[in-house]
């Protein structure tokens, strides 16, 4: 049985119908592709904000209090999200995050750190980032009995 429905549109409703029928498929199908393409940049910028800025701030606060760089880096590790996040397994990602954090440290407390401190801190930061990139290797595994 064939059902025929006659749609009667007013002039404004017809324009709205055409507008929705054009833009709705674009929003549903094309927008997610675009978001997926920029997801890497969003992840890095959120890591910069939540990890890099916070690590630099806590590290600089510890250095201003007179702590040595080793203790300040451990203190920053224990008081930031670096210890708890899982990063992608990507050397460039960690390098970009370190560059951001490095620049943040220089801007906030460059007078309290020297080149040796920054090199040691870079090694420490990248080691912790490597652990965060391979979190499943460092977590205990439990066998079902």
Image: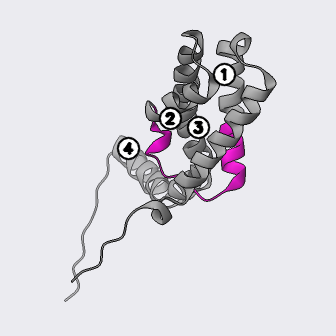
Q: Position of residue 22 (x, y in %)?
A: 49, 55
Residue under pointer 2: 77
Q: Could you tell me how many numbered marks the image carries? A: 4
Mark 1, secondary structure of its residue: helix
The residue carrying pointer 4 sits among few (fewer than 14), some (14 to 19) or many (20 or more) residues within 10 Å by Cα, namely: few
- Of label 3 and label 4, which has the lower sequence position? 4
Tell me, yes or no, whether the two marked residues, 2 and 3, touch with CB atoms within 8 Å: no
Spatial CA span between label 2 and label 1: 14 Å
Residue under pointer 4: 11
Q: Position of residue 58 (x, y in %)?
A: 51, 22
Spatial CA span between label 3 and label 1: 17 Å
Mark 3, secondary structure of its residue: helix
Q: Which mark is residue 38?
A: none
- Of label 2 and label 4, which has the lower sequence position? 4
- Of label 2 and label 3, which has the lower sequence position? 3
Residue under pointer 1: 105
Q: Using residue 104 as the reference point, say whether residue 43 is left or right of it.
A: left
């Amino acid at each position: 049985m064939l059902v025929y429905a006659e749609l009667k549109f007013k002039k404004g409703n017809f324009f709205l119908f055409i507008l929705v029928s054009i833009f709705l498929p674009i929003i549903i199908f094309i927008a997610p592709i675009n978001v997926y393409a920029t997801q890497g940049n969003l992840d890095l910028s959120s890591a910069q904000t939540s990890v890099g800025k916070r690590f630099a701030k806590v590290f600089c606060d510890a250095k201003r209090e007179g702590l040595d760089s080793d203790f300040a880096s451990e203190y920053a590790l224990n008081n930031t999200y670096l210890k708890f996040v899982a990063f992608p397994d990507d050397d460039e990602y960690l390098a970009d995050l370190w560059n951001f954090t490095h620049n943040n440290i220089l801007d906030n407390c460059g007078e309290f750190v020297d080149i040796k401190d920054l090199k040691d801190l870079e090694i420490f930061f990248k080691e912790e980032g490597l652990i965060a990139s391979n979190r499943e290797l460092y977590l205990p595994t439990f066998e079902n009995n």
